[in-house]
Structure formats: structure tokens, C-alpha cells
């Protein structure tokens, strides 16, 4: 296999993405971030679709860049319930087996010595990308006892199949409502599992996940909590309650979808919040980091949409924010690592979500070139 630098320089016979204005890039790669993270025994991951790991995808540049820079992967969507849970006691592991390996076999992750972060056993919303559609029909119209049995069977089937292959699981994701004071304990969303089982569904999910995989780290994961505002306080209260209920929770996952104007400083709210987590006796992990910048306007379908900063100086600001998150993670107690929500700007969710208004949120541009943010992370990892 060609080296990462050779693949990037050669383009691997792949047409380059149009770039409408200059971007701030780092110097050429001498080595990736992975050796630096490994030397510090720091978990550094990236979210990825399974299709991008297939042999020959983008001439091998995607896999080479991922392998050189990260020691963990997290599947973006393929471990979510709609991708796996096709009916009561009916599961589709075809995509996940490619990465994790069927029982007794190695998958892509093991072949590349990558840890895997499992995302997610329960996605606590009732939308199509979070809850299988069949739950909304007669098959989902079941009693409390039947609902508990279905959930237990699902967690046992999924977490049990990959027992020992997944280092950490998001057991429950995004269960706290964005609307303030909805009347439920911990402001929990009124989702399918809450309606069937009440708040105890979280306790049960953690206990069943531990049964299925005794060694995996188990997390509650959410967004919009990082600065310790009202939603963050609900998360702390939920974590405290789960511990009191003897749920085997390892820590709290903080998604960190932030922008290039975010200020993360020692003694500021972000540092205080992770210290509050420590005081609960829990670990924390930055689970879905990306740092958006305002983007130039391009029509839908244009390859530059969401890729080109409106102000090139924002890439320098973005680099400072990335550095500040890594400094916090490396200097505070009980941080279990950082997972970045994507590899290159071309595959980021931000342009689609924002209608092209924001983007360029990751360490590599759309043509796999390391940005200033990459250099900033490299410098933090190299610092003593």
C-alpha cells in the first residue's frame, strides 16, 4: 500500500474537489496523529460510514488517512437501531460484521488495530433515523412487559454479538429534551421507551448492556450540555440518579458540536462542567467533536457547498478551538478521549444540516489535505 503522503500527493487517480477560495492548510504530513496519540495513550477516534472503509473507496485515500491519524473508529449510522433492528427478534448485521467481524472472525477494525466505539443501543427519539419504523405499527403496540423483553433481547443480540470487540458503548443517546421543563424527570424526552417503561428504561439498558459485554465502557451521550447550562445540569442529575440506581454507567459523553467562536478556557464553564462530572465519580469523553465555520454560499449540488469559509481567517480561529478542546481533554482528570465526528469536510453532516450556511468543520478538507486545525492538534499532542 502507498504511504499516506504518497496517496495524498498522487491523488490516487481521483478527481480533486473544486475549491472556490484558498483554505488554510498545514504543511505536508510527516506522520499522522495516530502515533502521537498512541505515545500519550490517548484515545483519538473518528466517525465513519461503513461504505468509506470498503476496499478501493476513493482510491484508498480515505482508509489511509483514517488509519494514519486515528486509533479508534465509530460508525456514524450502521449501529443505530434502524440499521440493525428489522423486526422483533430480526436483526441485520451485514454492514457491521464487515467492520467488527462475525463471531469468531476479524473485521476491518481488528485488521487495522482500531478500537471501536459503539453508537448507539438506544437512540431516545421517535424519528425515522432513531427508532425503526415498525415500532410505529402493530408490532410496536405491546405491553410494558413485552417492550422490556424486546429491548432486552435487542441489547443482548447486538452488544453480545460484538462482546470484546467494542471498547465503549453509547448505551442511551439524546434522551434529554431540548425544551425546558417538560415535566418529566430529568427533562427526559417523551419517547417510545419512556412511554412504555418510564425513566427506568435507562437503568435497564445499562444493566442489560453490562450483562451482554462485561468489559465495555458504558456511556450516556448528549449534545448541548458542554457549557453546563440547564440541559447540562439535567445530564448531571441523570448521571447521579443512574449511579444511585446502581446502573453500571462509566461516564458521560459530551458531543461538542461547536463553532469557531467558542471559547474554552481554564476556569471557564467548559472546564467547570467536566470537573462537575468528575465529582460525580464518572468519566467523560468528547464524543462527536466538530468545529463549524460560516461558509460561502453555493447552490444545492455544488461540490463547494459548505466547504469554503466565508472568511478564511475563521480557519485559524477553528484551529484555536480544536487546540483548546484537546488541551482540556489532556489536562483534566477522567477524560477517556476525543472522537471527531468525521474525517474530511466532504463527508461532514454539517453542510446538509445547515443548508450550506456552515461547514468546513473537520481536520481535513474535502481533498484529504490537513488543515490548520490538524496542525493545532498535532502541536498539542506533541507538547509535554
Image (cartoon, rainbow, N blue to C red):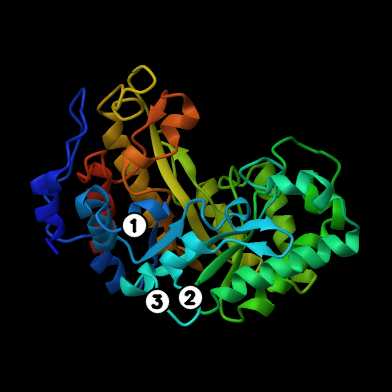
Tell me the residue at 69%/38% (across/down).
178
The residue lying toward the viewer, choosing from 302 and 377, is 302
Per the rendering, the mark at residue 165 is: 2
- Which of the marked residues, 2 or 1, is nearer the chain's N terminus? 1
Instruction: Give the Cα separation between the discs numbered 2 and 3.
Output: 9 Å
Query: Which quarter of the figure is the N terminus placed in?
Result: bottom left
Q: Is residue 382 left or right of residue 175?
A: left
Quadrant housing residue 313: top left
Q: Residue at x 42, y 65 (%)?
A: 98
Q: Are marks 3 and 1 in contact (CB under 8 Å)?
A: no
Q: Which residue is mark 1?
A: 53
> Relative to residue 331, is residue 5 drawn left or right?
left
Specify few, some or many for label 3: CA neighbours under 10 Å numbering under 14, 14-19, or 20 or more: some
Q: CA distance from mark 3 to mark 1?
A: 14 Å
Give the left or right position of residue 254, taking residue 262 as reference. right
| Residue 250 visible within the image | no
- Give the crowd class for mark 1: few <14, some 14-19, many >=20 residues within 10 Å: some
Q: Quadrant of the C terminus?
A: bottom left
Amino acid at each position: 500500500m502507498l504511504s499516506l503522503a504518497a496517496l495524498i500527493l498522487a491523488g490516487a487517480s481521483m478527481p480533486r474537489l473544486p475549491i472556490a477560495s484558498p483554505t488554510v492548510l498545514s504543511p505536508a504530513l510527516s506522520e499522522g496523529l495516530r502515533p502521537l496519540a498512541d505515545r500519550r495513550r490517548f484515545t483519538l477516534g473518528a466517525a465513519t460510514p461503513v461504505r468509506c472503509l470498503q476496499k478501493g473507496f476513493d482510491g484508498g485515500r480515505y482508509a489511509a488517512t483514517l488509519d494514519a491519524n486515528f486509533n479508534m473508529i465509530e460508525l456514524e449510522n450502521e449501529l443505530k437501531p434502524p440499521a440493525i433492528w428489522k423486526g422483533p427478534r430480526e436483526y441485520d448485521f451485514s454492514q457491521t460484521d464487515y467492520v467488527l467481524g462475525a463471531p469468531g472472525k476479524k473485521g476491518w477494525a481488528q485488521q487495522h488495530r482500531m478500537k471501536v466505539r459503539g453508537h448507539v443501543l438506544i437512540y431516545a427519539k421517535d424519528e425515522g433515523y432513531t427508532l425503526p419504523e415498525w415500532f410505529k405499527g402493530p408490532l410496536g403496540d405491546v405491553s410494558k412487559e413485552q417492550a422490556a423483553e424486546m429491548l432486552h433481547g435487542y441489547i443482548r443480540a447486538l452488544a453480545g454479538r460484538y462482546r470484546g470487540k467494542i471498547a465503549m458503548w453509547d448505551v442511551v443517546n439524546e434522551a434529554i429534551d431540548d425544551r425546558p421543563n417538560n415535566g418529566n424527570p430529568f427533562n427526559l424526552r417523551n419517547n417510545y421507551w419512556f412511554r412504555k417503561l418510564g425513566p427506568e428504561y435507562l437503568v435497564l439498558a445499562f444493566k442489560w448492556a453490562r450483562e451482554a459485554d462485561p468489559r465495555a465502557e458504558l456511556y450516556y451521550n448528549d449534545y448541548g450540555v458542554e457549557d453546563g447550562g440547564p440541559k447540562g445540569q439535567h445530564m448531571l442529575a441523570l448521571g447521579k440518579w443512574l449511579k444511585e440506581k446502581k446502573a453500571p454507567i462509566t461516564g458521560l459523553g459530551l458531543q461538542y458540536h461547536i463553532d469557531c467562536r467558542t471559547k474554552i478556557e481554564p476556569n471557564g464553564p467548559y472546564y467547570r462542567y467536566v470537573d462537575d462530572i468528575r465529582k460525580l465519580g464518572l468519566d467523560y469523553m468528547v464524543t462527536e467533536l466538530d468545529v463549524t465555520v460560516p461558509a460561502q454560499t453555493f447552490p444545492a449540488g455544488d461540490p463547494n457547498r459548505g466547504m469554503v469559509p466565508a472568511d478564511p481567517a475563521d480557519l485559524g480561529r477553528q484551529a484555536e478551538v480544536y487546540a483548546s478542546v484537546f488541551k482540556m481533554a489532556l489536562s483534566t482528570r477522567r477524560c477517556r478521549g476525543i472522537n471527531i465526528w468525521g474525517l474530511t469536510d466532504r463527508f461532514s453532516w454539517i453542510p446538509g444540516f445547515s443548508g450550506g450556511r456552515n461547514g468546513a468543520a473537520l481536520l481535513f478538507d474535502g481533498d484529504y489535505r490537513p488543515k490548520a486545525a490538524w496542525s493545532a492538534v498535532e502541536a498539542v499532542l506533541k507538547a509535554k
